[in-house]
Image (tube, rainbow, N blue to C red):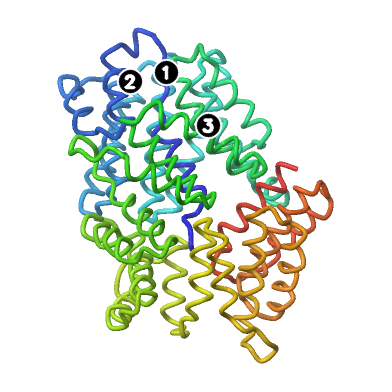
Amino acid sequence: MAKPHPFFLLLFVWLLSYTGSAAPAFNSHHQDVYHELLKLKVKSGRALLLPQQHSNNAADLLLANYGDFLELCVQQNQGRLHELLEAQETRLEMLEDLPQQDKWVLYAKAEVQMQLAMSKLLFGNRLSAAWDFRKAYLQYSHNVKKHPEFLPNRKNLGVLQVLIGSVPDKYKWFLSIIGLKGSIRQGMANLKQATAPENPFYQEAQLLYVVVKHLTEPEKEVQALKQIKSMAEKQPDNLLFQFVAMHLFKKARASKEALQVYLHVPRTKAYLSFPYLHHLAADLYLYRADYDKSVQENRKFLELHKGQHYLKSANYKLYLAYALGNHKPQAQWHLQHVSQVGIEETEEDRYAARYALKQEPLVKPLMQARLYSDGGYYQEALQELKKLHISTKTPVAIQAEYYYRKARIYHGTDSLQQALPLYKQAISLCEGTDLYFAPSASLQLGYVYQELKQINTARLYFKQALSYKQHEYKNSIDAKAKLALSAM
């Protein structure tokens, strides 16, 4: 199924994780506020900060900004956008008036600039956001040069360096001209340094390190999942940690584990309402053919969500749940509703919009095999594929998907030699079309040949994945291929 672009997850975790040190500028009261905010207990965090709401202290300004940023990022309420963006701009101006030799002032400036950039990007203001990201990067770089011992800067700078390092070589000259330099190796080194025990908030750095490793080193997925599971279990009251664990397990097709995390997330009113968790859960139930619960979760999401993202996707998933559950009238209503709601910013929403526009008939065994496979239910997926009778008379799109899905199933069960010819067959069938199975199969072949230690062949397939132009998952497939190539 369509998945959120991996960098949304990465940036979301990164911007929530604020590190401090036992210094007068960041005292025990600030740490109490910070811990509440990090758990997504924004209301109590703001309440603790209330006595300092008019303070010019850098830590106070930064923590106040976290509350506003978290509200925007999690709830995406368009009605609050102008007010909360204006408040962030004001805090940035106030930080500019403070002593610029103070490491906390410098760090707060970089963090607020980054949160402002992310807030703008979330609501579609890409040009202004890009400029703010650049300012934040340059500020972090300056901070590290001026205060190399201050570990928090290395964590955030490290993440940016990884992102910049994943850009193809042919574009890096431009980034260098505007002052943006980085590499995956350099970024991971900075992140690793920030996980040192002497950093009082090393756990947040560890969280980021796990997320970045999961993105850049697919072969270490098991290790990354083990680490995030341990972190979530040690802090069951931290909703951020539970979200990251749930998302990474889902992304790794370990939907049983992801669902267990979801069933135990803290749900009291002390936490910021997090509607997107219901949307994730709806997918997890859909994967295991629990259609009623999938419908229930997506309806809950639509009831609580105040933003424009994922509305098309939620209606598309409701269509699937109703259609596969043999409720045709409800299925058709939601399919028609896809074009009437939301925006097409995320890949999930763009895919839903394209699907609704095409109005292609649903091939139930193929769709159910896809869902089972996405959830890690590989034997059930194979059983669904056996219901299909593929021949040369079968439409090319169905043939291509059949071979691609079968390849993913064998790949998921580590039957690499069985997966290889199936991926290649899918690519061959897609020739001359804009079907995404070709670029996706090319990406997966790159991973397979990496596992087989055939690095040159892997590199060829990653480059091939990048060569495809118009398809539904271009952003995420390109991002993964670029990361893989940069890490080689």
- Label 2 to label 1, Cα distance in Å? 11 Å
Badge 2 element: helix
Q: Is residue 179 visible?
A: no
- Mark 3 / mark 2, whichever is N-terminal: 2
- Quadrant hosting residue 246: top left
The outermost residue toward the top is 24
In the rendered image of this protein, does residue 116 appear above or below residue 205? below
- Label 3 to label 2, Cα distance in Å? 33 Å
Q: Identify residue for label 2.
A: 58
Q: Is residue 125 visible?
A: yes
Report x, y in % for residue 459: 78, 53
- Quadrant hosting residue 282: bottom left
Q: Identify residue for label 1.
A: 100
Q: Which mark is residue 227?
A: 3
Report x, y in % for residue 356: 41, 78
**Nearer to me, 319 or 284:** 284
